[in-house]
């Protein structure tokens, strides 16, 4: 009984947090030139409050930051990128799509 209750509580907590997740996609200036540039961005941005995941693409010159909108903002994330030497242009800022399938 306790196990079922804990599982249900955990599922509810995960579901509640997912609705606040957003994905910010920015292009950095100066451009990322190598793996070291990517690692610098990933290594620093992962410590910013509210950041859940950071992905980079040298080919597209984009940084995708998954973040909790209740804990941080686009302005804070752009300021954090500026701190490590990158100006940013916002490509998109969208709510993260839920991966849960709707019941029929």
Image: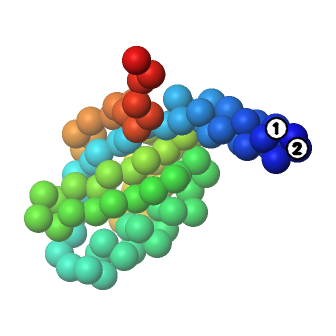
Res. 58 mark: none
Categorize mark 1 by other alpha carbons within 10 Å: few (<14), some (14-19), many (20+): few
**Residue shown at 29%/45% (left/top)?**
25
Left/right placement of residue 83 relative to residue 63 reads: right
Q: Residues within 10 Å of mark 2 (few under 14, many from 20)?
A: few
> Quadrant location of the N terminus?
top right
Q: Is residue 40 visible?
A: yes
Horizontal side, residue 24 vs residue 75: left or right: left
**Residue 71: image location, x then y, percent:** 62, 39
Q: In which quadrant of the rendered image does the C terminus lie?
A: top left
The quadrant holding residue 29 is bottom left
Which x, y percent locates residue 52? 51, 53
Please identify the residue farthest to the left as the structure is shown: 59
Q: Residue at x 21, y 63 (%)?
A: 57
Residue 5's tag is 1
Residue placed most toward the observer, 45 or 53: 53
Please provide percent x and percent y for residue 41: 38, 67
Q: Which residue is mark 2?
A: 2
Q: Nearer the viewer, residue 80 or 61?
A: 61
Q: How many numbered marks appear?
A: 2
* Above or below: residue 72 compared with residue 59: above
Is the C-beta separation of discs 1 and 2 under 8 Å?
Answer: yes
């Amino acid at each position: 009984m306790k196990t079922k209750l804990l599982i249900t509580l955990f599922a509810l907590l995960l579901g509640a947090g997912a609705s606040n997740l957003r994905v910010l996609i920015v292009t950095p200036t100066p451009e990322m030139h190598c793996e070291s540039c990517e690692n610098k961005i990933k290594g620093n941005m992962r410590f910013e409050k509210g950041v859940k995941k950071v992905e980079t693409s040298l080919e597209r010159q984009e940084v995708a930051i998954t973040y909790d909108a209740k804990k941080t903002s686009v302005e804070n994330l752009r300021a954090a990128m500026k701190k490590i030497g990158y100006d940013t242009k916002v490509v998109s800022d969208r709510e993260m799509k839920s991966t849960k399938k709707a019941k029929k």
